[in-house]
Image (cartoon, rainbow, N blue to C red):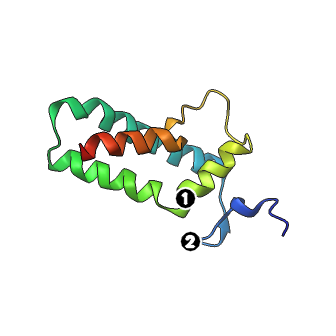
């Protein structure tokens, strides 16, 4: 099976995604990821819980898989902060939350 360009299609919408839109989404999720990490020391209030759920929804989505694949193919600018695309980063954060 030829998988070249396979992840370029947003399966939820069925259209090609503009790279600027994808970068914006990754940047927003990265900011959310950082905010959750920084807020963990002060506990998990309802606002933080909703942000955690939003991050989990992203991590379990086709969008995350698509973004991860784009990162693996080197489609993002080198200076784009994208720790949210690290499987270990999100997994470790969610493990800390469960403790």
The residue wearing badge 2 is 12
Mark 1 Cα shell of 10 Å, populated few (<14), some (14-19), many (≥20): many
Q: Gap between marks 1 and 2, in whole Å?
A: 8 Å
Q: Are marks 1 and 2 in contact (CB under 8 Å)?
A: yes
Question: Residue at the location (68% across, 48% down)?
Answer: 70
Question: Residue at the location (85% across, 66% down)?
Answer: 2
Q: Could you say whether the residue bearing mark 2 is in a helix, strand or loop?
A: loop
> Can you say whether 93 is above or below 64 in the image?
above
> Can you say whether 86 is above or below 64 in the image?
above
Which sits earlier in the primary sequence, circle 1 or circle 2?
Answer: 2
| Residue closer to the observer: 37 or 27 | 37
Q: Position of residue 1 (x, y in %)?
A: 84, 70
Quarter of the image where one finds residue 23: top right
| Residue closer to the observer: 62 or 95 | 95
Q: Position of residue 76 (x, y in %)?
A: 67, 39
Query: In this view, which residue lies farthest toward the front?
Result: 99
Left or right: residue 31 versus residue 76 is left
Q: Quadrant of the C terminus?
A: top left
Query: In this view, which residue lies farthest toward the right?
Result: 2
Q: Could you say whether the residue bearing mark 1 is in a helix, strand or loop?
A: helix
Left or right: residue 18 versus residue 59 is right
Left or right: residue 46 versus residue 6 is left
Q: Position of residue 91 (x, y in %)?
A: 42, 45
Question: Residue at the location (54% across, 54% down)?
Answer: 64
Query: In this view, which residue lies farthest toward the top?
Result: 79
> Can you say whether 61 is above or below 45 in the image?
below
Residue 19 disc label: none
Residue 63 disc label: 1
Quarter of the image where one finds residue 44: top left
């Amino acid at each position: 099976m030829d998988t070249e360009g396979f992840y370029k299609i947003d399966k939820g919408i069925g259209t090609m995604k503009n790279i600027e839109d994808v970068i914006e989404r990754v940047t927003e999720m990265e900011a959310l990821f950082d905010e959750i990490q920084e807020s963990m020391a002060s506990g998990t209030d309802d606002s933080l819980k909703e942000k955690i759920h939003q991050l989990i929804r992203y991590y379990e989505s086709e969008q995350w898989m698509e973004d991860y694949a784009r990162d693996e193919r080197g489609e993002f600018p080198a200076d784009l902060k994208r720790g949210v695309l690290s499987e270990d980063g999100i997994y470790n954060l969610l493990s800390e939350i469960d403790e």
